[in-house]
Amino acid sequence: MQRLVTVVVPAAALTAVAWWSGGFFPRSWGALLLVAAIGLAAVAILADQVEVGRRTVVLAGALFALAAWQVVTTAWAVAPDAPVLEAERTLVYASAVLLALLAVPSRRATDLVLAVLVGAGAATVSGLLAHALGAGVPDERLELPFGYPNASGIVATTSLVLGLGLSTGRGRLGRALGGGVAAPAAVALALSLSRGSILAAVLGILVLCLVTQSRHALGTVAIVGASGLASVGIVSLAGRLRDDGAAPREALALVAVAALAGASGWLALRREPRAATGDTAFRLRRVVVAVSAVIAVGVVAVGAYEVRESRSTPTTLEGAPNRLLSTSTSSRGDYWDVAARMVAQHPLGGQGAGGFTRVWLQERPALLFVRDAHNLYLETLAELGPVGLVLLLIALATPLAAARRAAADADGRAALAAYAALLAHAALDWDWELPAVTLGTLLLAVALVRLGPSEPVRAVTTAARALVLGGATLLGAVAIAVHAGNGATADANDLLDRGDAGAARRAAVRAERFRPWAAEPWELMGEAELALGRTAEARAHLRRAIHEDPRSWNAWLSLAVASTGRERTAALGRAQALNPLAPEVAALIGEQNP
């Protein structure tokens, strides 16, 4: 029963969150916090002993400290509402890690790796089927279940790397599932056309091969990997599953992929693991491969720098080869430049959690809207300063301290390879903002900690039980408030978009009740009043929003719409200064000065 719970609960959570837009929107965070609170309460009530040592404390403590530091940056944040929202998401990660550390003992660590494989694999396979059987268009990238192709790509990478690793393990279920998931995962990765995810997959497979010391195991990896390559070839010949609905050739391709997956899983199941080789020549070849990999990484790094400096524009999608062979950074060089300037201007404290969006709008060189710098580490330094970056790196590096011990087991090798791929991909995209991706990463981190050197087993005393139960109760209260506040804010925005200003105003009032520190509810109230024709009330609410958040260009723009004369002119000027390229501002200025 314990094994079933360890596998099923995390796997189901990862799959569900993946289909919930990856957990990107704040509306979902309260529910995730509540699940963590219930889990911690169950541990407090049911557990008799837990494994708690230095690595456990450091990993969970660094994440909780990161959330606290994000709240602290409210004091100087360029976007005062953002730090609390960022801290809410980090609190989801910290709570999930704490729950996993307390609930999963060392003997169940391999089950946690299996859980991530099942969760990522289920999300990948279901997204692939929905893409193939739904309405496709020529050259459409696979973006399900997240709605973002690069997220689908990195989760497919996770499934592929974990599948290759677990196919060499001792557990029969892990070998069968690992071998079986490789084919659809490779297809999903190819259809995502995510260059960063493909590079991460190459890195993960390389790490897996370097830490595998058995020829027999490498042979299994090669067999399972071949099924993935064959599946990609079949789907490519069938038209990349881009027809509208399920065409006969697509159905045949899916049947062929399923057959390859079944055969690969059966072969992996039949290939019992063998002892590692002690052949000196084999070790030497692995050293040569490692050195070659280091050289390759250096070449790629130099090439990436040159591409970034060239400022190449994204290639129009006229087919998979054009995108995959493109040297475009998709404007990432511009994102990184803005983040680097944030670091230079505020080297100690950063510009506050979530501040990149606001700075980008003011400094962007082209009319592109992005929320994140597409580099977790640079963005953390830009927003949170060295303190925030150190806390993040401590959390992410702690599992690597147990890498040598973890790599002695096939499950540990699989977790290490997938973890390396995920950490690398975070330097190219906004994975941290997608809980479905980051929770999978952090569950692998917990598994690596548990697969490392043993930590002390401690009895759960009455005082410890009360402490955990009290923390769970507090977390549950926070979860309810977060769910109510973020849900009301989202409702107000949705209702305004649908033109129901009266209901939007009521939702905004409810949002202010649960988020009294935030400017956004006041801004939403003002916009709703403006839509209702109550300009005096709208101006009052918008002035309150601007008082709370003086750098909200949207609040200044709405105030300009609600005002006349000098106040309108001043508000328009401020909105233009905060977002110079905004077409809405330009249009309003054009109306004022025809």
Image: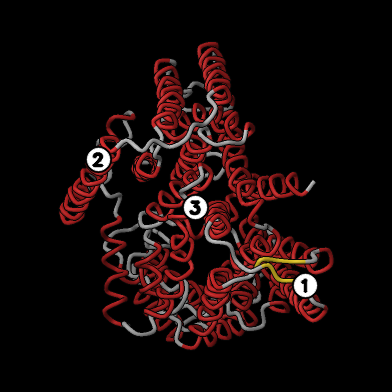
The first of marks 2 and 3 along the sequence is: 2
Residue located at (40% from left, 31% from top): 218
- Provide residue 342's location: percent of width, then percent of height: 31, 76
Specify the amino acid type for callout 2: Leu
Depth check: 110 or 214 in front?
214
- Is there a contact, CB below 8 Å, between mark 1 and mark 2? no
Q: Residue at x 55, y 33 (%)?
A: 178
Element type at marker 3? helix
Nearer to the camera, 20 or 579: 20
Q: Mark 1 or mark 3, which has the lower sequence index?
A: 3
| Colour approach in the figure | secondary structure
Q: What separation in Å lies between label 1 and label 3 (alpha carbons)?
A: 27 Å
Q: Is residue 96 above or below residue 84?
A: above
Q: Which residue type does callout 3 highlight?
A: Ala
Q: Residues within 10 Å of mark 3 (few under 14, many from 20)?
A: many
Mark 1 and mark 3 in contact? Answer it, CB < 8 Å: no
Q: Is residue 245 visible?
A: no
User: Which quarter of the rendered picture does the C terminus lie within?
Assistant: bottom left
| Residue that label 1 marks | 460
Image height of 87 relative to 308, above or below: below
Q: Would you name the residue on which mark 2 appears?
A: 284
Image location (x, y in percent) of residue 418: 46, 47
Q: Is residue 118 above or below residue 134?
A: below
Left or right, residue 145 beside residue 590: right
The residue identified by callout 3 is 406
State the residue at coordinates (79%, 67%). Answer: 41
Residue 44: x and y in percent read 79, 69
Labels 2 & 3 near each other (Cβ < 8 A): no
In percent of the image, x 47 and y 47: which residue is there?
A: 408
Mark 1–mark 2 distance (CA, rounded to whole Å): 48 Å
Looking at the image, is mark 1 or mark 2 nearer the viewer? 2
